């Protein structure tokens, strides 16, 4: 991928994450994360989001390995756990992790609480 194409990709992804953060901020406010503080947000990232990302990636790897051993797709679908957790894809989970990281930076800079 060229530098220009990668730059465009990053701009698009960061724009999506910005919209996600602003949508959730409007829906839930800032109090819940402000009360938890940076350590609470980091804990949420580590215990919830990272665990979910790892679980999704492990399931995808298991399904890939089963297919690599020659198992038909129908049997993989029947016997392997689904890749995604509920309706959340790995891309969604990774975007949430980036979003929480940005929220931590905003907290550090005093820019997270409403009315600032």
Image (cartoon, grey):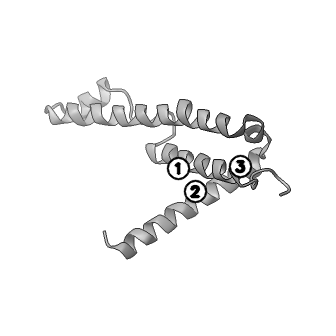
Disc marking residue 108: none
The answer to whether residue 17 is above or below residue 66 is below
Marks 1 & 3, CB-CB < 8 Å contact: no
**Residue bearing mark 3:** 107
Quarter occupied by the C terminus: bottom right
Instruction: Specify which label sits upstream in the sequence, 2 or 3.
Output: 2
Circles 1, 2 touching at the beta carbon (< 8 Å): yes
Q: Which residue is mark 2?
A: 17
Q: Residue at x 17, y 30 (%)?
A: 71
* Image quadrant where residue 15 sits: bottom right
* Closer to us: 53 or 71: 53
Return the disc, 1 or 3, that comes first in the chain's sequence. 1
Q: Is residue 80 above or below residue 111?
A: above
Picture quadrant of residue 38: top right
User: Where residue 100 sits: x, y (%)?
Assistant: 61, 46
Q: CA distance from mark 1 to mark 3?
A: 18 Å
- Cα–Cα gap, marks 1 and 2: 6 Å
Q: Secondary structure at mark 2?
A: helix
Q: CA distance from mark 2 to mark 3?
A: 17 Å
Residue situated furthest front in the rendering: 108
Q: Could you tell me residue 56's position as x and y percent?
A: 41, 35
Label 1 sits on a secondary structure element that is helix
x and y percentages locating residue 17 in the rendered image: 57, 56
At 54% from the left edge and 45% from the top edge, which residue is drawn? Answer: 97
**Horizontal placement of 104 versus 30: left or right?**
left
Question: In terms of secondary structure, where does tag 3 sit?
Answer: helix
According to the picture, the residue beneath numbered tag 1 turns out to be 95
**Outermost right residue:** 115
């Amino acid at each position: 991928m060229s530098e220009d194409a990668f730059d465009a990709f990053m701009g698009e992804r960061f724009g999506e994450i910005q919209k996600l953060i602003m949508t959730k901020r409007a829906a839930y406010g800032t109090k819940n994360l402000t009360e938890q503080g940076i350590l609470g947000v980091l804990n949420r990232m580590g215990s919830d989001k990272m665990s979910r990302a790892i679980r999704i990636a492990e399931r995808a790897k298991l399904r890939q390995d089963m297919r690599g051993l020659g198992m038909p797709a129908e049997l993989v679908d029947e016997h392997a756990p689904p890749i995604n957790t509920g309706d959340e894809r790995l891309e969604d989970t990774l975007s949430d992790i980036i979003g929480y990281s940005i929220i931590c930076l905003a907290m550090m800079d005093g820019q997270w609480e409403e009315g600032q």
